Every structure is written in structure tokens, then in C-alpha cells.
Image (tube, helix red, strand yellow):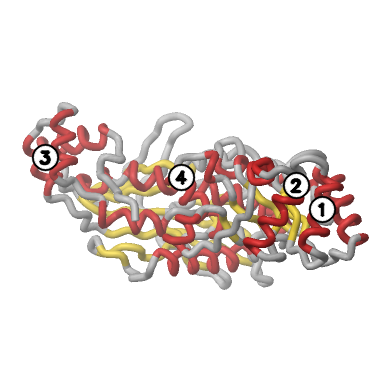
Amino acid sequence: MPTASALFTDRYELTMLAAALADGTADRDCVFEVFARRLPHGRRYGVLAGTGRLLEALPRFRFGTDELATLREQGLSDERLLDWLAGFRFSGDIDGYAEGDLYFPGSPVLTVRASFAEGVLLETLALSILNHDSAIASAAARMVAAACERPCIEMGSRRTHEEAAVAAARAAHLVGFTASSNLEAGRRYGVPTTGTSAHAFTLLHDDERSAFRAQVEALGVGTTLLVDTYDVEQGIRTAVEVAGPELGGIRLDSGDLPTLATRARQLLDELGATTTRVIVTSDLDEYAIAGLMAAPVDGYGVGTSLVTGSGAPTAGMVYKLVERDGVPVAKRSEGKNSVGGRKHAVRRHGADGTATAEVVSSAPVRPRDGDRDLLVPLVRGGQPCDDVTPADALRRAREHHARVREALPAEGWALSRGEPALETLTA
């Protein structure tokens, strides 16, 4: 398990803390909230992901001897600050939307109640995890919807930071991706892993037939052979000759994928390989997947467009102080205003179970039939409310997401740009 160094944070959190310790305001009871002011342009919904990773990281977010020495080296030499940090253990309460839930503009997806000193230290930790994972999950959910129940495989590890790759695999699996190429995601979170070969393996051998034969002998006829290194049609013929009609699958990684997939299916059927799957990869995103809807494709491998900013634009979540010693406080800056007071949130549903609105209020919401409370307890007195393994936490989040997405209005799954699927009603 990776460390959660308290130095994975911004310096201004410590300078604010130093000043608050000096003037006596550090112990004020405060409420911080995480929310997104808006969704990425044209998106209809967001998916909250990363809560489980945040809860994993919280107990390890400590200032030990090495961290304190580093702070001194970087000019943070206030002994009162350093002494406080040496004894820091988060002791507050955290509520939030259940991981895997949908969110909309203004949804209070995380609420931290603690002293100012403890609460302010969590800003970067919370935002770096939730912003990254929610961006990946929101993009991946669109791809799952576009795939129309055909399986999607996450394979973006080579396009991002090594730890981001693990987090991305987790977030993608949460919203319905069936597997990942990332082995560490399998170890930490129980994400099913898969993978066969790249073009390098074919090029290693004197000819394509030798490469296919070696792969089949090592992995069995159920393997997936990459057939586009040289000539696709000849590659398919050679693959079936080597593995027989029980070949598990072929993979297409370049070219005009709809045309190639159609011809591949025809050729496989002609050769008697009627159960051999056709898997496509090559910089797929939700639009490319939707464009393949009519093609005889059995699964998609998604990498670059999922783990990079172009495919998964930032979730834009912020961490704001909304209450101090029971008094609502709010930012009034134009375009960046906030609403004071700790929020309550429910999701309204019609008689048929379809979600109709998100209600966010600084006062308790008068319940109606079909309302679902969105905020659940996550941490009390610094301790997680549920003692579950990382794999079980992901499984629960995946199951929760599958339930809540069924209630989203049909227009919410449209890939075209539009307004959020649910209106956020504030009170």
C-alpha cells in the first residue's frame, strides 16, 4: 500500500495553520464542504469516486520525523506549528455522498467537521483524490453507456503516472469497466486483470505464424491474438489456422475500425470461428465507441482518452469553509461564490423511481415520498464508520453506482452536450 505523506499538500495550508495557532483561531469549530460549482462543459452528470481511497489515506496522513525535517529545510521553522503537526491525528467527523453516487452542480459530496486546524490540512488530500478519481469515473461511465453492455477494459497505465494508473483502473471498474491491464489495481482492489501481447511480440518472431503459435502454446486457444501487425485479413487467417476455430479472440488496434471489424467478423465466420470475439482498441473514447455501435464488436480496450485530461476533464471540485462556530460563512467573489452553512441533500424521485431533482439546503429538507438522503456518515471521531477492505469498499461502490444510475433520466445518458440531467434546487 502506498504511503500518504502529509507533504502531498500545499504550503499555504501550513502557513494558514501557523497564523491560526498564533492568533488563537485554530481551535474554532468549522465545517468544510467539497462541491463542484459546475460540471465540465456539456456534461449531464458527474460520478463521485475516490472516497474509499481518501478514507484509506486519512490514517496515514501524518507528520513524522522526516516530514518535519523537510518542513524546516523549506523554511517552515515555527516551533509552535511543528509541535502541533508532530501530534496531528485527524479527530473530526466526515459525511459525504456514497462513493459511486451521481453528483450535480452544488452537490455537497464531502463534509468535514473539525477544528480549523485539522480541517484545513485535509484540503489538498481530499481534492487531489476526489478530483482525479471523479474525473476518471465520470468519463468512464459515459464510455460504459456508449458500449451498450459490451465489456470495456481499462488499459491506460502507460499514459499516466504509475499511481494515477492504479487509481484510474479503480475508478473505471467502479462504474462498470470489467477489467484492467494494471496488476497493482488487481492486488490492491481486486480489479480483474487481463492482457495478452503487443505488436512487439509479433515483431520479435521471424513471422506472424511463429508468434501466434508461441502465444497459443503458452496461453491456450482461448487467448486473444493481435492480428494487425502486417495485413489484417492474412493475420486472421493465420490466427485461425494456428489456434483453430475455438480461438478466443482477435484484437484490432489500428485503421478504420468499423470497416475492419465488420470484415473480421465475416472472415472469422467463413473460417468457422463463429465464437471468436472481436476486440478493438486504439485511442477509443465514448464517441468512437458509440460510432462502433453497429459494428460486430465484442469489447473495447480504452487507454489514453480515459486517463488523460482530454478524455476526463477535471471535475472542478473545491473545498470551502461554510460554517464557523455554528455561524454560516460564505465567499461572495463574482463567479466563485459559495452558500454558507452546512448542507443537507436529498434526491427527489418520481413515482416510477426516476430521479427528478437534487435538493440542497442549509436547513433540513422536509421529506417527500421518493426522497433519498444523500449524505452518509463516513468518519466519526477520526475513525472510519465502516471497517472494510479496499476491495470490499470498491465492490460496494460499484454496486451502489449500478443502482443509482438506473434512476437517471434517459436524457442524462446522452453523449451530446446539454444541461445537467437534474436541476439542483437550493434553499
**Residue 220, x across and y down, in percent:** 67, 65
Say what amino acid the circle numbered 4 marks: Ala
Q: 236 or 134: which is nearer to us?
A: 236
Say what amino acid the circle numbered 2 marks: Glu
Residue tagged 3: 82
Residue 354 vs residue 182: left or right? right
Structural crowding at the residue carrying mark 2, measured as other residues with C-alpha within 10 Å and reported as few (<14), some (14–19) or many (≥20): many
**Residue 96, x across and y down, in percent:** 41, 58
Confirm or deny contact between disc 1 and disc 3 (CB under 8 A). no
Please tell me which residue is depicted at 40% across the width and 54% down the height of the picture: 110
Residue 179 vs residue 382: left or right? right
Among the 4 quarters of the image, the one containing residue 371: bottom right
Say what amino acid the circle numbered 1 marks: Thr
Residue at mark 1 to residue at mark 2: CA–CA distance: 8 Å
Question: Mark 3 or mark 4: which comes first in sequence?
Answer: 3
Kindly identify which numbered label has been placed on residue 238.
1
Residue tagged 4: 164
Tell me if I can see residue 284 in this picture: no
Residue tagged 2: 208
Confirm or deny contact between disc 1 and disc 2 (CB under 8 A). yes
Tell me if I can see residue 337 in this picture: yes
Residue at mark 1 to residue at mark 3: CA–CA distance: 67 Å
Please tell me which residue is depicted at 53% across the width and 64% down the height of the picture: 398
Among the 4 quarters of the image, the one containing residue 229: top right
Confirm or deny contact between disc 2 and disc 3 (CB under 8 A). no
Helix, strand or loop at disc 3? helix
Question: Mark 1 or mark 3: which comes first in sequence?
Answer: 3
Residue 89 vs residue 56: left or right? left
Residue at mark 3 to residue at mark 4: CA–CA distance: 30 Å
Residue at mark 2 to residue at mark 4: CA–CA distance: 35 Å
Confirm or deny contact between disc 3 and disc 4 (CB under 8 A). no
Q: 392 or 180: which is nearer to us?
A: 180
